[in-house]
Image (cartoon, grey):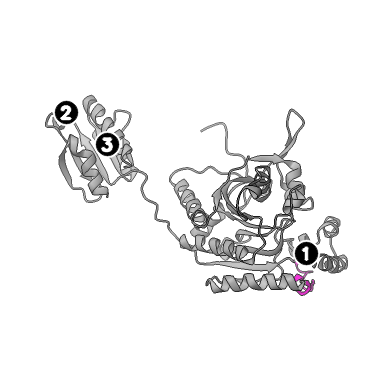
Amino acid sequence: MSTFQAPKGTYDLLPPDSAKYLAVREALTAPLRNSGYGYIETPGFESVELFARGVGESTDIVTKEMYAFETKGGTKLALRPEGTASVLRAALEANLHKVGNLPVKLWYSGSYYRYERPQKGRYRHFSQVGAEAIGAEDPALDAELIILADQAYRSLGLQNFRILLNSLGDKECRPVYRAALQEFLRGLDLDEDTLRRADINPLRVLDDKRESVQKQLGDAPLLRDYLCDACKAYHEEVRELITAAGVSFEDDPKLVRGLDYYTRTTFEFVHDGLGSQSAVGGGGRYDGLSEMIGGPALPSVGWALGVDRTVLALEAEGVELEIPASTSVFAVPLGEEARRVLFAKVTELRKVGIAADFSYGGKGLKGAMKNANRSGARYAIVAGERDLAEGVVQLKDMESGEQVAIGVNEIVAELEARLG
């Protein structure tokens, strides 16, 4: 056993399970790639200040969970705890909002890091697929992203998830609600840290998961009762567009996302089969974030879907993904001449797009055929000195057990025909 182990709260993705994660990533990104979203990749670390401004200094992410460090040159950096701030920073730096039509539509996939108490469904290193539509204020854009996420989950066969929807208002109406909520919270029996949070961003208290806090919030004022006419109309159009697309959702007036930058539309995808870590994804509109990090006014909306949580949700529902075998043909040489000939044929097969593997290490027939079985290959090519003397190889169908001799020069054409 190795002296080293994966750090606490992290995990390794290994075959064959890693194929499931790749399939989930592919399914979550497919609707985006089909809807005008282009791929973006950002560094795994950024300036601490980017996240402090964007995510919010009062959030647990910034105060407790960021992996922050100082470089030898004195620069303060942090491993990225979420994707939106990084993507918007990159788009602004590259002036994407000036060179093309708005919105700038981007998707990404990567690892994120938060120092949290590890438990099933909550890791210190986790994987997400995200999408951002930057530079347009349009209810249809909010609806589009919700619909695309719903489409992605359903393409995987996931059924028992729910979409929670709310509006957090805007800079016109939220201050009035904020004041009312703060007044309410000051009358509760809360600890000093929570009261301090209520002074900085009272909506964060609504997101507190502790039962001692939640049981006191039953009569808390609801933001929907404070929405201005513009926010009400905007939210109603989002609801109508989602409904018209056949996507079911639940209005949740207490839904508050854990990041400070959200405005108006906010939503969460939850799966009741995951216990306390029920959220599999979420997002919303963040019209003021660009200005928070030094850019121009760019109303935007986006979401992030957890790959890890989605895999757990699939397991909770007993959904088995159809993952094709990584190998279609496995070559088994018996003798040095056969090694030379079959290795060349494996290379030819790969060039025409057929997934092929080879028995390495000079194994005997029994051991090599065990490897062929484990590979999941549909066909095995077996050849020894006598076969090559006759100019043939043995082609074995690993499903039916049928075996036929074919000419050495016919291998590629024959397998192309059989595998379509």
Q: Residue at x 55, y 61 (%)?
A: 149
Secondary element at image label 2:
helix
Secondary element at image label 1:
helix
Dot placed on the residue nearer the N-terminal end, 2 or 1: 1
**Contact? badges 3 and 1 (CB < 8 Å):** no
Dot placed on the residue nearer the N-terminal end, 2 or 3: 3
Depth check: give the residue in front, 367 or 165: 165
In the rendered structure, which amino acid carries the disc numbered 1? Val
In the rendered structure, which amino acid carries the disc numbered 3? Ala
Query: Which residue range is magenta in the image?
Result: 213-226
Q: Residue at x 25, y 50 (%)?
A: 399
Q: Residue at x 25, y 32 (%)?
A: 342
- Which x, y percent locates residue 53? 77, 48
**Residue behind mark 2:** 385
Depth check: give the residue in front, 257 or 214: 257
- Which x, y percent locates residue 100? 60, 50
Q: Residue lying farthest left? A: 390
Dot placed on the residue nearer the N-terminal end, 3 or 1: 1
- Up-down: is 114 above or below 156? above
- Up-down: is 387 above or below 420? above
